[in-house]
Image: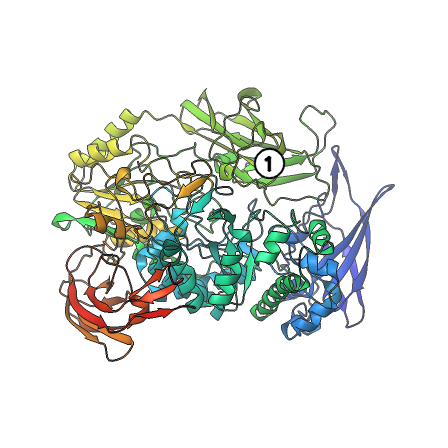
Amino acid sequence: MILWGDMGSESASFALDCRGAEKRRKGETEKPQASLTVEPSPFHIYVVITLVFGDKVREIGGVRFTCGELRQCVLEGYKACLSPHRGIFNFLILPDIVIHRSIMTVKDIVDSAFVQIANADIEKIIKELTQDEKVSLLSGEDFWHTVPIPRLNIPSIRLSDGPNGVRGTHFFSSVPAACLPCGTAIGATFDRDLALKIGHLLAAEAKAKGAHVILGPTINIARGPLGGRGFESYSEDPFLSGILAGHYCKGLKERNVSATLKHLVCNDQEHERMAVNSIVTDRAMREIYLLPFMIAIALGKPDAVMTAYNKVNGLHASENRELLQDILREEWKWDGLVMSDWFGTYSTSEAVNAGLDLEMPGPPRWRGGALSHAITANKIPLASLNARVRAVLKLVQKASKSGIPEKAPETQLNRAEDRALLRKIASEAIVLLKNEEDILPLNKDKRIAIIGPNAKITAYCGGGSAALNPYYTVTPLDGISNSAKAGVDFAQGVYAHQMLPLLGKQLRLEDGQNGFKLSIFNDAPDVATRAPLEERHETDSMIIFMDYDHPDLQTIWYADAEGYFVPEESGIYDFGLTVNGTAKLYVDGKLVIDNTVNQRPGTSFFGSGTLEEISSLELEAGKKYKVLIQWACGKTSTFKVPGVVDFGHGGFRFGACKQLCPQAGIEQAVQVAASVDQVVLVAGLNGEWESEGEDRANMSLPPNTDELISRVLQANPNTVVVIQSGTPVEMPWINEAKAVLHAWYGGNETGNGLADVVFGDVNPSGKLPLTFPRRLKDNPTYFNFRSEGGRVLYGEDVYVGYRYYEGLELEPLFPFGHGLSYTTFQVSDLNVDDSEKILSVSCKVQNTGSRKGAESHPPIRRPLKELKEFWKVSLDSGAEQTVTIPLNIVRATSFWDEKSNSWCSYEGAYKIMVGTSSDGEFLETVVNVSETTYWSGGW
């Protein structure tokens, strides 16, 4: 289809060429005749297309092309992207949509969607809005957009998931994006400047995806090691979390993209997350759980905050006036928008009056007609309604500065400088846990063996809303192989998947293309006359339909996935099928898996899906097998899990792999390890083990992994063990290992970042942002994690993480802040200038080793110790630098006094300790606070 025309300020005319457009129905092919009319407006061009198929007429009305989309067409020449509207043209092939450059020029196309709102008088707009229009603004238009009011020139803005990338507007079939290392990896950098650069990168990605608001960063506290989303947050320490989040937000704001702090507050577990009541003392709430929000708001001035799913001391966060009004807006003087987490609104009047501005997603469940009725009944004061509307309008006004058009096309960026930054973050996040006998770095000129379940796959991110479709990924095997110069051997050892590896990219279409055909139906498979609403070519067999839409889609609908699998090796293959809904899997017409009856609830699909059902078949190498999955939508599921988010349409996941006997795989790995001098064993978790929707059951590595590591260490004691996880894992073999790296989930550049550290191109400088306990029972939340009777008691109070271990004198496996280097550092000459309320704490840091390296060192702590500031410096070999850190002595010595309901800096002597982790040697001095000070307000 080719669209061209001439645009003037008052009229527009277009011609439509339907070359390549054809109807597919019941096997017939018929080219349509087409005509269109155009209704220009100051902000959009409305095109009505009439298609004639023989005696059938189909009119597509209200197809809106924003001026920004037309500008995109011109700026990119003949490559126009109108993907947001492709769902409307469901029966057309659209090879190209082209704006004719010789007629239309850039000066003819003015992106005016945000011009008027940019300088508008918000109070004047509020007066002009009708009640129905006000109500409509307080919930989403769809999954990712706010509601526009064209009459008053109020455009729609787009929100998109963060925090480690910008997905865009689709879980299903999304546009590829840059993927950062996970939150705890960023926490391990202890680098505020790097967090600022991360904000800049995400702002550029947001503009490529047309997103005005990023749903991140996540700054909940990792109070225990089992939280399903623990990898998303930065740390167990509120100060570190707040500082990094503040600079992340600042980076976005400097590029006029809005950040969203989430989730306010105590969204620290996944078990029954929509229903659980988090019971927390006021002191712990202030000193631990609210503090990162307080600091980030002061430093980064984010434009939005997202509420948590859970209750806080008996009241859901989204209707908790004390949190949303008394603390956030009145005490901290923050002036931004509060939105719900997706489907995290549970009331109408209560939430509006408490300060929840925006219910997401749309269409509304609790607003709309219900809100209008509540207003009529005088349950919501006009002032409260207007306050909520004002917050939405202000956010839209701020979005006007971004230069992002309304409902802009989603594009890919993938710049060389971004890839370099992603590689830098991945390498600087890696923590060197052990390096006895200086095993690391390895020699590129010696042969190397790479072993392990995470070596040949890329565990680049955790699961859930933080997951996205990456531009590319680099496996550890590829990264190390690309740097090695003397050859690489590989052994799998064992598998570590929780569910069978995705099969989609191993399938082929009939014409040989990679992937499978996905067909959407309104009718069940047993309806002989059913015709597809849409046919798509897909490669990802983890299909989440939560934001899928089609104008003709019925309440109950179906999908078929069909492709051909040609195994490379003969043997017994396991096939797996996981669903939110119901489905069957066939191979060459034979029913292999029936996941429609006797369904077993599992952890998939944010906790709403089934366990993976597995069945086995013997396959021959080189033979072509037809794989068919017939699925029915989420509403056909035979069970409902309480306390989890129901994301609507549901989805399905299918995978397969050849069976591997663990003992045989371990024996092969042992032989390979014994045959070379250098071995890197890569193991750990992935986005299946750590995911939104379900907490981990234990700290163990996947089955057979510990045995593999132990056996390989016996065969080659110089093996370098690399562990990937977002949160702590048990390491029963740690005493036998000489060299251990913790590599987190490293984003796009996972393998390259690891190779840089393994071979010494980058000197490791990462520090653990979490305490790693020796065993699960040692952690402070052991008796107080998961919902029991609908509540979870935060029984450790303020003694979270290292505060707990030091208070009990309980030695962890690795303490908070632990991280070695290939060089050595000496910290000396502590000096404190306490002549002002802002102390000046300085010390000398010298690189006493032979390599360039970086060191971060927290200078003060409490209850026995608390992190109060940190700084990171990079020094060449032999170099010395004096580091001076300002420290607000009142803030640093304050605790939350529940009697006075305020912060209190109590008079007395305080020890300042400067070191390189929460454990070990410190430089120490004492400062005296001469008088007690009570204070409140922001940071």
Q: Which residue is mark 1?
A: 517
Q: Residues within 10 Å of mark 1 (few under 14, many from 20)?
A: many
Q: Is residue 484 above or below residue 539?
A: below
Looking at this rendering, what residue extends furthest in the right direction? 55
Type of colouring? rainbow
Q: Is residue 742 above or below residue 713?
A: below
x, y percent for residue 784 = 36, 41
Residue 101 seen anywhere in this rendered image of the structure? yes
The answer to whether residue 17 is left or right of residue 214 is: right
x, y percent for residue 396 = 61, 65
* In-front residue for pair 74/767: 767
* In-front residue for pair 529/236: 236
Which image quadrant is residue 91 in?
top right
The amino acid marked with disc number 1 is Lys
x, y percent for residue 547 = 60, 45
Task: Give the quarter of the figure containing the C terminus.
Answer: bottom left
Give the residue drawn at x 28%, y 25%.
Answer: 664
Residue 103 seen anywhere in this rendered image of the structure? no
The answer to whether residue 445 is left or right of residue 253 is: left
x, y percent for residue 353 = 60, 57
Which image quadrant is residue 6 in?
bottom right
Q: Is residue 719 above or below residue 372?
A: above
Give the residue drawn at x 56%, y 68%.
Answer: 402
Give the residue drawn at x 69%, y 68%.
Answer: 126
Q: Secondary structure at mark 1?
A: strand
* In-front residue for pair 744/680: 744
The answer to whether residue 334 is left or right of residue 232 is: right
